[in-house]
Image (cartoon, rainbow, N blue to C red):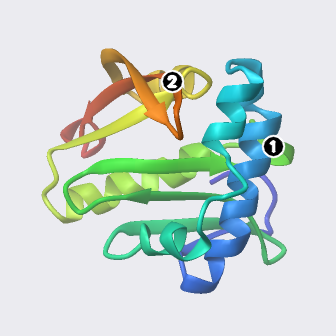
């Protein structure tokens, strides 16, 4: 993954749900806030998100956390059909190759499980990162989240490109 020697990638565990939810909320408030309004941020990273519902979304998925000194600094999950649902890296750990390492891990899973394409719904903020990772925009979308509309991008990437 690059970065510090203490940076590690491991499978998601149920007890990771709470710290991942906290990381998600902090990241959306501190990083995505440059591209979304305060109302959009509040709806997206709402304090009313149910922890058990959040945790259960990791079930039966390819899911990993990146840790540094046993502290979660990033996480990712993808459905068995190849939809990358969540990818977040701590606001304090951006630009260190953590997200790239997490995506590469999912690409390996996709190859190992004969998934031909990965899709994602990327935020305005994440769109340039996904483009650098070989994803292309399928369409711009307006999605409703807790009564507020947000713009994101349906993106896709062929998996065989990574197999070389």
Q: Is residue 18 above or below residue 163?
A: below
What count of labels does the image hold? 2
Picture quarter with the C terminus: top left
Residue 34 or 102: which is nearer the viewer?
A: 34
Element at label 1: helix
Q: Residue at x 63, y 85 (%)?
A: 15
Q: Residue at x 63, y 39 (%)?
A: 43
> How many residues crowd around disc 2 within 10 Å: few (fewer than 14), some, or many (20 or more)?
some
Residue 147 or 22: which is nearer the viewer?
A: 147
Q: Quarter-wise, where is residue 62 in the image?
A: bottom left
Q: Residue 116 in the image: x percent, y percent?
A: 14, 45
Q: Inspect this view and state whether residue 133 appears.
A: yes
Q: Is residue 47 left or right of residue 114?
A: right
Could you give the CA–CA distance between mark 1 and mark 2, rounded to whole angstroms?
Answer: 24 Å
Q: Residue 58 in the image: x percent, y percent?
A: 44, 70
Q: Earlier in the sequence, mark 1 or mark 2?
A: 1
Q: Is residue 3 left or right of residue 58?
A: right
Q: Residue 30 in the image: x percent, y percent?
A: 83, 36
Element at label 2: strand
Q: Is residue 156 above or below residue 77?
A: above
> How many residues crowd around disc 1 within 10 Å: few (fewer than 14), some, or many (20 or more)?
some
Marks 2 and 1: in contact by CB < 8 Å?
A: no
Q: Residue at x 67, y 62 (%)?
A: 21
Disc 2 marks which residue? 149
Q: Residue at x 33, y 58 (%)?
A: 108
- Looking at the rendered structure, which numbered label has been put on residue 24? none
- Looking at the rendered structure, which numbered label has been put on residue 91? 1
Q: Residue 95 in the image: x percent, y percent?
A: 74, 36
Q: Is residue 59 left or right of residue 118?
A: right
Query: Mark 1 or mark 2, which is nearer to you?
Result: 2
């Amino acid at each position: 993954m690059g970065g510090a020697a203490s940076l590690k990638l491991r499978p998601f565990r149920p007890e990771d749900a709470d710290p991942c939810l906290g990381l998600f909320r902090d990241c959306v408030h501190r990083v995505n806030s440059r591209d979304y309004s305060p109302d959009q941020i509040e709806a997206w990273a709402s304090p009313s998100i149910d922890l058990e519902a959040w945790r259960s979304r990791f079930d039966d998925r390819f899911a990993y956390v990146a840790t540094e000194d046993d502290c979660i600094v990033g996480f990712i999950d993808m459905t068995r059909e190849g939809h990358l649902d969540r990818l977040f890296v701590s606001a304090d750990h951006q630009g260190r190759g953590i997200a790239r390492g997490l995506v590469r891990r999912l690409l390996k899973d996709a190859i190992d499980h004969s998934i031909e394409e990965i899709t994602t719904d990327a935020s305005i903020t994440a769109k340039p990162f996904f483009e650098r990772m070989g994803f292309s925009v399928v369409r711009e979308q307006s999605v409703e989240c807790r009564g507020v509309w947000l713009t994101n991008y349906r993106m896709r990437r062929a998996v065989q490109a990574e197999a070389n």
